[in-house]
Image (spheres, grey):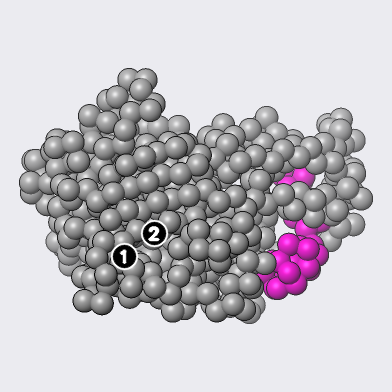
Amino acid sequence: MVRNGSWRFTLTVVAAVATTALAGCSSSKPKEAAGPSSIVVGEYSGINSLDPMMNTGSITIGGNETLAIYGTLIRWDSKKNEGVPYMAQSLEHNENYTEWTLKLRPGMVFSDGTPYNAAAVVKNLDRDRKSFFSIANSLSVVDSIKATDDTTVVIKLKQPNAQFSYVLSIGPGMIAAPSYIDKVDGGDKTAPAVGAGPFVVSEFKPGTSLTLKPNPTYALDKPLLSSLKFQMAGTEQAQLQAFESGQLQAGIVLDSHSDVEIREKKIPTISTRQTSGVAILLNNRKNSPLHDVRLRRAIQLAFNPKVWNERNNGGEEVASDMLFMKGSVFYSPDQQRIPYDPAAAKQLIDQVKAETKWDGKLNWVGPSTQTNQPVILSSMLNPLGVTLNVTNLPVANFYTKVYVDHDFDLAGGGGGIADATPYGSIHNNYVTPTNTLGYNNPKMAKIADEMGAASTLEQRQAVMKKFLELYIETVPAISCGTTTWNFFYKPNVNGLQQVGGQMIQFDKVWVS
């Protein structure tokens, strides 16, 4: 029985987080640390806006930067797999997880001196869930949001979600000052960001760099860094080169080549393994040829995990005919396998061409950090009569084209299924009306609801078997395997904390 009024809930699963040489999480700087210090962190993508509504709350697209400015209502404890209060004072749920009551710390203010109160939280959450950006996906389960007094917000859900606290630990939990929102929504897209987090903006060069300094009105312990800078360094290899030359003190890489290099050189890292962390996104909408499930199945049947691993992953076994690999709580050696059969793929492609007069051309959109992916996929599809028209864009522009405009047939991206929060993974990626794939299947919606109501690991594992069966049958995307996200750093950078969205919290960081 779940106790009413519990300020937190504990998941009974183990997160797929493997940390090597994790920096200490001390709340105060040791005596040997010499005065104020600063660090420069490599960005995975150069962000164009600090509006939290336009970012995903993910380490790869502005998450670290916006987290430093706004904080989050709830902090996700990646070791314990539970949400704990951060900017908020407490979070309680009712017995069936359909109502969540958020209590704020009294007297908090934004960096412009305006109150950080329940009305501000409601304004942010309502704005997020009514937006056309992907942040709305996480909140589509919400039925109503109401401030009952100056420090209390009651959130009612359309169906049970035992993992809802995670939502408030990523993008939706980043609360901007209403004064800033009014300026941005009024047309001033360059208005200075105003939050209540540990840092404030010192200088912002969209797409290039962001420099922060401590927020004098921050309600919690004062940050230990005198300056925190995020710098766009180019490709993942360019980040590593800048790191080794001393230009960066930390950075982010996702590709397997860099993962191998980091391990070989014994560079300290916070590493996260995620099922389907890299995927080929398929546009299921009617304006794409891939609306036809036969073509999506054909691409899946043509996808050769062995070739992908040889040419994209340095020979490491990342892609597989198993969606859930060893280390995941959903791994099972007898799980349903993803089929590979290029001859059957060719039959489906020819069938669609004959019936629809489709010319065999598909538009690929990918980030400029992963230009090899369409080349590898083309080698699998060209012999079957499919040609990819390739467009590679800077990550921020790629994000807009794919995740906001949905202007693609295939795209390099991610469809991560997190062990700790499987409901959010399924619901956001495959159920919400604004999901990136345009996927719409009532069976998947039912599976998501069952996952939201599941409160034990055994229940979630049973539901995930149903998900896997439908995933293979309808092919909403192509999983390129379990991937490793690496946040790497210098040995003298201490106090790093990993939170929701694989983001890194910097408020307790110090340099020895």
Q: Residues within 10 Å of mark 1 (few under 14, many from 20)?
A: many
* Quadrant in which the C terminus is drawn: bottom left
Q: Which mark is residue 358?
A: none
**Circles 2, 1 touching at the beta carbon (< 8 Å):** yes
Residue displayed at 46% across by 68% down = 489
| Residue at the top extreme, as displayed | 186
Q: Give the image location of residue 273, x and y in percent.
A: 53, 69
**Given the image, on which type of amino acid does mark 1 rest?**
Val
Which secondary structure, mark 1? loop
Q: Give the image location of residue 207, x and y in percent.
A: 51, 39
Residue interval drawn in magenta: 292-320
Q: Is residue 436 above or below residue 321?
A: above
Residue bearing the label numbered 2: 39
Q: State whether residue 19 appears in this view.
A: no
- Give how far apart the Cα atoms at labels 2 and 1 are: 9 Å
Q: Give the image location of residue 137, x and y in percent.
A: 43, 43
Q: Which mark is residue 509?
A: 1
Residue 161: quarter of image: bottom left
- Left/right placement of residue 190 relative to residue 145 reads right
